[in-house]
Image: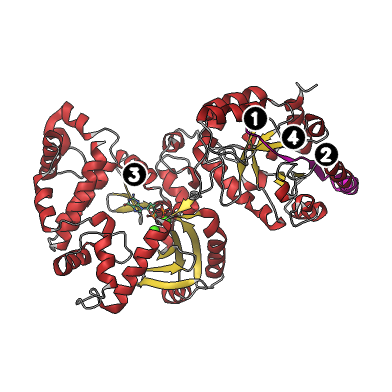
C-alpha cells in the first residue's frame, strides 16, 4: 500500500532533517506519517478521485507534503528524499535499532568513520574506533557491541513463556513499593503476543527517583541502557530489554491505552477520535485544549463510544468496528477453566504421582483432571502398553473413590502417537477402555502437505481419538509447523467431533492465534491443555488462555470450561460411531 511506503519515507526524511537540526520540519513529516498510516483509503485512490486538493484535505497533510505525495504517486520517487539520502546514505532503519543509537549519532558515525550498516558498526566497535570519538567513549562502544549481540542473538524477540515468570516477579517487586500507586505491564506482553520484542512497564508514583533506583538494580539486570527522570531502560540477563515509564495519575489510562498498542489498533482508534473531532494521545483524550478523559482506559473508550477491547485482540483485526457497535465477544477467562486434560504422571516416566497431580489440580479449583501418559511408541519416555494402562486404571479408580465426596474426578486418557500412515501405536481395543484419547504427531515431520493432511485426517476419523495434540507441531523460534492443509483438518474435525488442542507449553503455544480464530469461526471445539510433566507446569494454563483469547475464543468454544458431566458428553459424542 502506498500509504505505509510514503509514511516510511517521511519518517526517514524527518530523521535526516533532525540530524541537520532543522527546526519544526521533522515534526511535520512525522505527523504526516502518522496521518497516512491512519487512513483507511489508499492515497492513490484519494488522489485519483480528488487530485492534489483532496490530499491537502487529509488532516496533518499541508500543501507542500501533498505535493510530495503527488510526486511519489506519479513518479514512484520523492526528489527531496533522494537528495537528503545522499547526505546520509546509510541503513538508518537497521542502525537505529541498536539501543542508544538515534539518527544524530548515526550521522556522526557515518561522517567520522563511514559507517553505513550494522556490519560496519560492529567492525568499528571491535577495532575500538568508536571509543575514541567525541561524545561516545569506551562505555558507549561497549553498549553498541552488546546491543548488536542482542539484535543478532534473538533477532530481537523472545518467547512470551520465557519472560512471563520474570515479568510477574518484577511486577510484584515494584508493586510492593509503597511509592508505587499504580503499575501495569503494557505493550505486547499485555496483549499476550507469543513472542515479545521488549517489556514495557507503566507506573504512577510519588517518588520516581526511588522507583527508578529499584528498577535499575532489580535482580537479573545486567545493563542499564539509560535513565532519565521519566524513563529508564535496562537489559536482562535472559536477553531482553525492559522499559519503565512514569506517568501521572490523570494520564494513566491514556498511557495504558497508548502503550498497550498494538500500533495498528492505536492508529484505528485515533482515527475514530479524529472523526469525532477529538484528539487522542498518551496524555489523554482532548476536545480542543480541554482534556475530557485520561485517568482510566474505560473512560477513554467510553467517550469514543466504544466497548473496551480486551488487550489480547487489540491488533486491528476487526475489534475496533465491533467495539463501536458494542458487539465484542466475551472471551474465555482463566477462571472459566475447570480442568486440564493433558498431564503426564510417573506412570510414563514423568515426575509426579497421579495423586499429587490431582491434589494440585484441586488447589487450582479444578473439578477434573485428565491423565494422558504416552503409549507404546514413545518407549524412550517409557510409553505404556495395554497391561500398564490397566494398572493405571486401577490406581485412578482407587483415587476416584476417595475424591468422589469432594466432587473431583480423574479421567484416564492417553497420548498416543499418530504413525506415518495415520494409524495409532496402540490397539483400538485398548483405547476403548480409556475415557478419552489424545493423538499427536511426534515423528516423521517431513512429509508432503498431502501426506501429512491425510495422516492427521485418518487419525481424526478413528472414533476413539478425542483430541489432536499440538496440531501444527511448531516450536516457537525453533521449528516451523509441518506442512498440512489446515482447512481440511478443520472440516474433518467438525465432521468427526474431534477437539483441537491449544497446547500451553511455553515453547509450543500450539495452536497459533490465527488458527484458533479459524476454529472459533467454523465452530470447531478447542481444549486448553498444559502438557504437564511436573505439577508446576499446571500453571501454564494462563499462557494457553492468553493464546485462546488472542484467537477470539469464548468460554463455550473451550471444552475444559464445561462441567464434569458436560465434558463426559463431549467424550461420548466422539465415540458414538465406535462399535
Ligand atoms: P514488541 O515490543 O515489539 O513486542 O511490541 P510492542 O507492541 O510492545 O511495541 P513497542 O514496545 O515498540 O511499543 C509499545 C506500544 O507503544 C505499542 O504497542 C504501541 C505504542 N507505540 C509505540 N510506538 C508507537 C507509534 O509510533 N505510534 C503509535 N500509535 N503507537 C506507538
Ligand atoms: Ca514492547
Ligand atoms: Ca518498548
Q: Of the residues tagged 3 and 4, which is closer to the observer?
A: 4
- Whole-number angstrom distance, CA of label 1 to CA of label 4: 26 Å
Report which residue position mark 1 lands on. 422
Q: Identify which residue, 522 or 499, lies in the foreground.
A: 499
- Whole-number angstrom distance, CA of label 2 to CA of label 1: 20 Å
Give the colour scheme shown.
secondary structure
Earlier in the chain: of badge 3 and badge 1, it is 3
Labels 4 and 2 touching (C-beta < 8 A) = no
Which portion, as a residue range, is magenta?
396-420
Please state if 526 lies on the left or on the right of 83 as rendered. right
> Mark 3: few, some, or many residues within 10 Å (few <14, many ≥20)?
many
Whether the residue under disc 3 has CB within 8 Å of ligand 1: yes
Report which residue position mark 2 lands on. 386
Report which residue position mark 3 lands on. 267
Q: Please say if 449 is above or below 164.
A: above
Earlier in the chain: of badge 2 and badge 3, it is 3
Q: Position of residue 572 (x, y in %)?
A: 77, 28
SS category of the residue bearing label 2: helix
SS category of the residue bearing label 4: helix
Amino acid at each position: 500500500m502506498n500509504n505505509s511506503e510514503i509514511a516510511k519515507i517521511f519518517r526517514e526524511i524527518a530523521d535526516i532533517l533532525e540530524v541537520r537540526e532543522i527546526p519544526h520540519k521533522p515534526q511535520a513529516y512525522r505527523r504526516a506519517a502518522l496521518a497516512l498510516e491512519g487512513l483507511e483509503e489508499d492515497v492513490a485512490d484519494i488522489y485519483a478521485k480528488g487530485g492534489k486538493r483532496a490530499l491537502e484535505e487529509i488532516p496533518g497533510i499541508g500543501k507542500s507534503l501533498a505535493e510530495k505525495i503527488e510526486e511519489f504517486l506519479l513518479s514512484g520517487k520523492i526528489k527531496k528524499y533522494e537528495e537528503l539520502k545522499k547526505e546520509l546514505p546509510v541503513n538508518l532503519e537497521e542502525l537505529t535499532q541498536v539501543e542508544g543509537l538515534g539518527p544524530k549519532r548515526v550521522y556522526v558515525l557515518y561522517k567520522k568513520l563511514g559507517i553505513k550498516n550494522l556490519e560496519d558498526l560492529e567492525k568499528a566497535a571491535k577495532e575500538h574506533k568508536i571509543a575514541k570519538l567525541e561524545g561516545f567513549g569506551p562505555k558507549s562502544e561497549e553498549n553498541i557491541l552488546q546491543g548488536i549481540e542482542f539484535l543478532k542473538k534473538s533477532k530481537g524477540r523472545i518467547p512470551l513463556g520465557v519472560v512471563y515468570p520474570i515479568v510477574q516477579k518484577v511486577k510484584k517487586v515494584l508493586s510492593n513499593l509503597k511509592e508505587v500507586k499504580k503499575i501495569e505491564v503494557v505493550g505486547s506482553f499485555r496483549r499476550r503476543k507469543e513472542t515479545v520484542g521488549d517489556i514495557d512497564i507503566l507506573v504512577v508514583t510519588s517518588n520516581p527517583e526511588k522507583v527508578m533506583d529499584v528498577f535499575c538494580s532489580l535482580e537479573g539486570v545486567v545493563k542499564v541502557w539509560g535513565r532519565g527522570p521519566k524513563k529508564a531502560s535496562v537489559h536482562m540477563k535472559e536477553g531482553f530489554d525492559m522499559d519503565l515509564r512514569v506517568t501521572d495519575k490523570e494520564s494513566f489510562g491514556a498511557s495504558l491505552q497508548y502503550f498497550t498498542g498494538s500500533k495498528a489498533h492505536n492508529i484505528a482508534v485515533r482515527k475514530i477520535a479524529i472523526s469525532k473531532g477529538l484528539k487522542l494521545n498518551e496524555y489523554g483524550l482532548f476536545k480542543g485544549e480541554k482534556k475530557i478523559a485520561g485517568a482510566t482506559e474505560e473512560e477513554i473508550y467510553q467517550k469514543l463510544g466504544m466497548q473496551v477491547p480486551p488487550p489480547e485482540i487489540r491488533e486491528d483485526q476487526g475489534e475496533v468496528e465491533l467495539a463501536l457497535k458494542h458487539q465484542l465477544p466475551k472471551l474465555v477467562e482463566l477462571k472459566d477453566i475447570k480442568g486440564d486434560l493433558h498431564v503426564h504422571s510417573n506412570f510414563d516416566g514423568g515426575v509426579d504421582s497421579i495423586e499429587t497431580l490431582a491434589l494440585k489440580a484441586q488447589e487450582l479449583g479444578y473439578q477434573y483432571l485428565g491423565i494422558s501418559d504416552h503409549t507404546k511408541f514413545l518407549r524412550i519416555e517409557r510409553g505404556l502398553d495395554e497391561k500398564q494402562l490397566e494398572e493405571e486404571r486401577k490406581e485412578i479408580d482407587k483415587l476416584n473413590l476417595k475424591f468422589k465426596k469432594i466432587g473431583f474426578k480423574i479421567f484416564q486418557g492417553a497420548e498416543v502417537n499418530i504413525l506415518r500412515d495415520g494409524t495409532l501405536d496402540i490397539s483400538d481395543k485398548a483405547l476403548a477402555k480409556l475415557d478419552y484419547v489424545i493423538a499427536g504427531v511426534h515423528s516423521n515431520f517431513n512429509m508432503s502437505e498431502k501426506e501429512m493432511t491425510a495422516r492427521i485426517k485418518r487419525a481424526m476419523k478413528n472414533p476413539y481419538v478425542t483430541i489432536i495434540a499440538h496440531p501444527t507441531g511448531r516450536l516457537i523460534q525453533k521449528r516451523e509447523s509441518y506442512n498440512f492443509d489446515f482447512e481440511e483438518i478443520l472440516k474433518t474435525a467438525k465432521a468427526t467431533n474431534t477437539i483441537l488442542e491449544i497446547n500451553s507449553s511455553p515453547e509450543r503455544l500450539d495452536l497459533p492465534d490465527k488458527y484458533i480464530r479459524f476454529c472459533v469461526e467454523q465452530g470447531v471445539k478447542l481444549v486448553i491443555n498444559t502438557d504437564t510433566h511436573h505439577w508446576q507446569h499446571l500453571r501454564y494454563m494462563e499462557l494457553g488462555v492468553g493464546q485462546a483469547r488472542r484467537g477470539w475464543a469464548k468460554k463455550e468454544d473451550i471444552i475444559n470450561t464445561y462441567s464434569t458431566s458436560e465434558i463426559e458428553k463431549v467424550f461420548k459424542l466422539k465415540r458414538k460411531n465406535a462399535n
